[in-house]
């Protein structure tokens, strides 16, 4: 019986707390998703460029 009361009280607290959550609007989600995607693409291109430059410099040094 004691476990049952614990589960009921816990469920009530979870429901009460979940009502306090402020969800983002669709516009906010779209803006933040776009920002993350653009930042990811930028860093991927940047790291690819750095990798290519290092690769070219090692090729140049090793073949001399």
Image (cartoon, grey):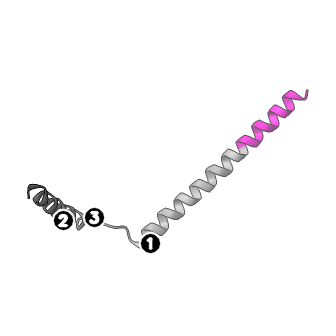
What segment is highlighted magenta in the picture?
50-64
User: Of marks 3 and 1, which one's residue comes earlier in the chain?
Assistant: 3
Helix, strand or loop status at disc 1: helix
Write the residue at 47% across / 62% down: 32
Residue under circle 3? 21
Write the residue at 52% across / 60% down: 35
Helix, strand or loop status at disc 3: loop
Residue under circle 2? 16
Write the residue at 21% across / 62% down: 14
Camera-near label (1 vs 2) is 2
Write the residue at 18% across / 65% down: 16
Does residue 24 appear left or right of residue 40 in this picture?
A: left
How far is disc 1 from disc 2 in space, using C-alphas? 26 Å
Question: Residue at the front extreme?
Answer: 1
Q: Position of residue 8 (x, y in %)?
A: 14, 63
- Check if mark 1's residue and mark 2's residue have beta carbons within 8 Å: no
Does residue 21 appear left or right of residue 37 in this picture?
A: left
| Quadrant including the C terminus | top right
User: Of marks 3 and 2, which one's residue comes earlier in the chain?
Assistant: 2
How far is disc 3 from disc 1 in space, using C-alphas? 18 Å
Q: Position of residue 39 (x, y in %)?
A: 57, 55
How far is disc 3 from disc 2 in space, using C-alphas? 10 Å
Asked if the magenta segment contains residue 58, the reply would be: yes
- Give the image quarter of residue 57: top right
Residue under circle 1? 27
Q: How many C-alpha atoms fall within 10 Å of the one at disc 3: few (<14), some, or many (≥20)? A: few
């Amino acid at each position: 019986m004691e476990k049952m009361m614990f589960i009921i009280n816990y469920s009530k607290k979870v429901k009460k707390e979940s009502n306090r959550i402020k969800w983002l609007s669709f516009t906010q989600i779209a803006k933040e998703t776009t920002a993350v995607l653009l930042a990811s693409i930028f860093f991927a291109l940047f790291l690819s460029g750095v990798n290519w430059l290092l690769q070219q410099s090692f090729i140049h040094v090793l073949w001399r």
